[in-house]
């Protein structure tokens, strides 16, 4: 009887070790991913590659920092000798995915980026956002004077409206009220096992930067969008808010423009012309 009991205990130990091993395998991180703890205890993942003048790349909605890996821009930045820092905004990628409203309210994602720059002790840096990353970056421009120049990609002026209907539409969609316009985005998010609750909260508490706040940003800002990208308002109207704004319209639609060579060339020319290195 004692021998049978010992065998059962050993079996459970083996099963437990196998299950633990499986958990480790599913949480194995790619090389180079690091973490820092944000202001409210949320862990934020990021990569930090290369040397030279730091450039932070900020990803869009239902994306993560890994989406920049498949772009011409990131490779060209590294080849040109820049230090490229790429966070996963909270709720995305390898970062924590808190489920409470308070974790996204009061510009939490902007605070995360400020915390990242503090964590890495960056005296100055350039920043590039695309799509929703541009929305977060726009608010960051009003709060961090370490940024020496910035690129807002894939965005027009519409996000400056606190009651922007498109934002509300997608917040409702990821909370369960799906429409014909939003069903594709929700289906895609489910296909990559994204956290729908977090995505809903990201839209609900998305940072809002008013036009008068943008007009106080004095650093060079490039607004760049695809010629077929009409979803988020007029990029020209956004560019005109910045005293040192520039506008570039390149071939492409919203989902593909930032991956291409023409986009990379335009952004690289701007980054080099405004770089301190």
Image: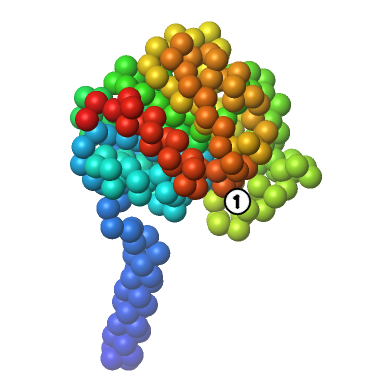
- What residue do we see at 20% from left, 41% from top? 51
Corner quadrant of residue 44:
top left
> What is the x, y in percent for residue 249?
57, 32
How many residues crowd mark 1 within 10 Å: few (<14), some (14–19), many (20+)?
Answer: some
Give the quarter of the figure containing the N terminus.
bottom left
Check disc 1 and report its element: helix, strand or loop: helix
Q: Is residue 115 visible?
A: no
Q: Count how many numbered circles sit on residues in the image.
A: 1
**Is residue 195 toward the left or the right of residue 8 in the image?**
right
- What residue do we see at 44% from left, 53% from top? 70
Give the quarter of the figure containing the C terminus.
top left
Image position of 81 with respect to 277: above or below: below
Corner quadrant of residue 181:
top right
Residue that label 1 marks: 189
> What is the x, y in percent for residue 154?
56, 34
Image position of 240 with respect to 46: above or below: above
**Is residue 116 toward the left or the right of residue 102 in the image?**
left
> What is the x, y in percent for residue 244?
43, 15
- What residue do we see at 66% from left, 39% from top? 228
Viewer-nearest residue: 162 or 242: 242
Image position of 173 with respect to 162: above or below: below
Corner quadrant of residue 13:
bottom left
Viewer-nearest residue: 104 or 232: 232
Q: Residue furthest right?
A: 180
> What is the x, y in percent for residue 50?
23, 45
């Amino acid at each position: 009887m004692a021998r049978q009991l010992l065998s059962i205990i050993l079996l459970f130990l083996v099963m437990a070790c196998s299950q633990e091993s499986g958990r480790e395998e599913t949480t194995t991180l790619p090389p180079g991913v690091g973490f820092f703890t944000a202001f409210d205890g949320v862990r934020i993942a990021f990569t930090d590659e290369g040397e030279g003048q730091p450039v932070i790349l900020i990803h869009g909605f239902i994306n993560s920092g890994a989406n920049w890996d498949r772009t011409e821009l990131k490779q060209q930045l590294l080849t040109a000798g820049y230090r490229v820092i790429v966070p996963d905004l909270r709720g995305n990628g390898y970062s924590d995915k808190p489920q409470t409203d308070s974790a996204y309210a009061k510009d939490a994602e902007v605070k995360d980026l400020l915390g990242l720059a503090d964590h890495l002790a960056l005296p100055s840096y350039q920043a590039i956002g695309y799509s929703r990353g541009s929305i977060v970056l726009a608010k960051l421009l009003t709060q961090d004077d370490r940024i020496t120049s910035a690129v807002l990609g894939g965005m027009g002026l519409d996000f400056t409206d606190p009651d922007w209907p498109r934002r509300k539409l997608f917040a409702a969609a990821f909370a369960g009220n799906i429409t014909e316009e939003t069903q594709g985005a929700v289906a895609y998010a489910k296909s990559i096992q994204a956290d729908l609750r977090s995505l809903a909260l990201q839209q609900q508490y998305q940072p809002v930067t008013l036009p008068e706040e943008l007009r106080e940003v004095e650093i060079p800002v490039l607004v760049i969008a695809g010629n077929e990208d009409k979803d988020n308002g007029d990029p020209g109207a956004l560019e005109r808010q910045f005293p040192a704004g520039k506008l570039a319209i390149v071939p492409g639609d919203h989902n593909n423009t930032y991956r291409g060579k023409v986009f990379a060339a335009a952004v690289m020319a701007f980054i080099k012309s405004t770089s301190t290195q």
